[in-house]
Amino acid sequence: MGAVTDGMDITEYMENGRQEYLLMRYKAADNLSDEKYREMFHDLRSEGILVNERYDDEEWVLRGNNGRKFYVKFDMDRGAAWNNRLKHFALIKLDVEKADVHSTSVNVKRIMKELPVTDYLNADMIPTYRERIGKYDRSRRMYLPALGEFLEFIGGKDAEAYADVIRGVPQVYSSKSRELPCYESILLFDYIINDFIQRTNMEEKARYYPVLIWWKISSVIPLRPCEVYQLPKDCIYEKSGKYYIHIERVKNKYKRKQYSTPVIKDFEIREDIFCLIRDYIDYINKILDADEAGYLFSIRILKETAGIRPKDEDVERITHVTMQTIYNHFKKEVIEQEYGYHMVPLGQKKDGNDIEEVKMGDVRHLAIINLMMMGYNPLYIMELAGHRKLNTQMGYYNHVDTFATAKSHMLKEMIKRTGNNLDFKDYDSGDFVIQKKLLGASYYGLPLVYDGKGRCRSRDFPYECVCTECIFCPHFIPDRNLSKEYYDALKEENEKDMEALRMELKLLMQDYTDNKKFEEMGKKIGVSLNKKILINAYRHLWEERE
């Protein structure tokens, strides 16, 4: 095991006004002079990141770029030496590594809670500590990476010994896939949002506008909630008859040159989303002068429209806490009281009146899944999502399968209601073939397909045939006597195709250069997923009829 006295890993990002950059990777140890640390303190204070006047204050007040304040009290009971070490650690993270203010404050607090458990690195406590942290639950194990980094920073024999113990505990960097609401709940939630927008006036909408715009944007563009919170008021524009929104990405801000592709910041949006945001901008301009509100979701505006009273008076824009408050009001006052639905936790939906709760962070994942199901280029999805690695998308495939299954049940019910006179445009499938308008006609007046599996609604049969199996064609109406074996064989073939496509995608991921192959792969995956939906829908219909 290597010594930790070399320090903790640091990646320093430097840039200037000409967009030149420099990434420096090195070890940072607690070996700077007191004068240097105090200089860092005053630099951070001049940047507005630290609010305090004095380095020696027991409590530091950190301010995020949204104005939100975070409080860290350096009051370890072992004296000034430990408190100074923690201050040094925080200064290196904030001033050199440009770490996020919130995460820095959280990690310092975690270190302060975990150090006493070691009796401040008492070597005699190591066996006891090893046994204790082995029993930590997932939440408490999240404290260990912060402590381990701090130990690397301060160095020394005892710090090395405890760092070695921490390395032996499985960390929680790779979490299991996010659990998402069922697809029926998502569609119902979307219906309520759209209906509320259509039927209410501006004054009624204004109270919940951050929620409405968050949903409309994030359900089609995979954004993190904080990227929506910091939208400037002038975020939308029109160009050559198309509509766009500019969004600053926040993940890995200081490591952006590690991305293999540029992070997209300007997105084309639908006209209805553009108009929704434009109407809100016109509305807030009537409340405040045009230059008074720099952010789309200015706290000054929300005080007027939603009665928001933030804890910190100097916060300029909405924060996650404020957004959650508005969202909770929307769920209670609109979804439950106005529409009569009942919000329930995940997995507790019992009937059609229940909606599984859609959390703020879910919507980004839903947008990524929908893009995958619609056959978009995986590289393009990576760019939209701001992912650093294409491999990140592989974790979404479990959700894709789940959502495809849910869509197949919905399609089955739609086929039953429409008697096969189904318009797939309403179904919103990503496969360009099955989006064609279905032709209505009497079943028995239609020609039989060549193998007798059903009938065809095409007016140009058989010259319009483009599918290898009629079941995948929008003009096909299956015969009710088709066997279970037929559907099972199609299902098995589809599963093999999907597995082969996943393996092919993994091979492609080793070389990011061939964009055309990735584009073809995205289309193949989208078509296969839509085939899966159709197969399962007809298969479930057969099972119900038997």
Image (cartoon, rainbow, N blue to C red):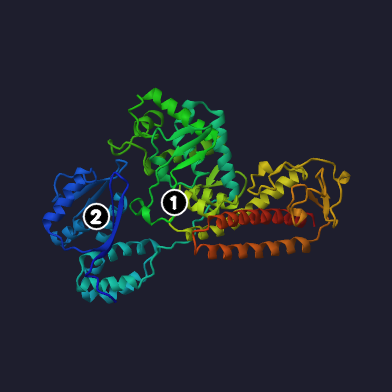
Q: Is residue 58 visible?
A: no
Q: Quadrant of residue 148?
A: bottom left
The residue that appears at 18% across and 60% down in the rendered structure is 85
Quarter of the image with the N terminus is bottom left
Q: Is 131 on the left-hand or right-hand side of 447?
A: left
Q: Quadrant of residue 193?
A: top right
Position in image of residue 192 (x %, y %): 56, 37
Q: Is 479 on the left-hand or right-hand side of 349?
A: right
**Badge 1 density bin: few <14, some 14–19, many ≥20, Cα 10 Å:** many
Q: CA distance from mark 1 to mark 2?
A: 24 Å
Which residue is more in the foreground, 521 or 434? Answer: 521
Instruction: Give the residue type at disc 1.
Output: Gly
Q: Quadrant of residue 154?
A: bottom left
Which residue is more in the foreground, 91 or 131? Answer: 91
The residue that appears at 19% across and 43% down in the rendered structure is 46
Provide the secondary structure element on which disc 1 rests.
Answer: loop
Q: Which mark is residue 11?
A: none
Which residue is more in the foreground, 422 or 522? Answer: 522
Q: Which mark is residue 96?
A: 2
Provide the secondary structure element on which disc 2 rests.
Answer: helix
Position in image of residue 146 (x %, y %): 30, 61
Q: Is 460 on the left-hand or right-hand side of 88?
A: right
The residue that appears at 36% across and 25% down in the rendered structure is 288
Which residue is more in the foreground, 107 or 122? Answer: 107
Position in image of residue 451 (x %, y %): 85, 57
Q: Specify the farthest residue to the right.
A: 445
Position in image of residue 167 (x %, y %): 33, 71
**Upstream in sequence: badge 1 or badge 2:** 2
Q: Which residue is mark 1?
A: 386
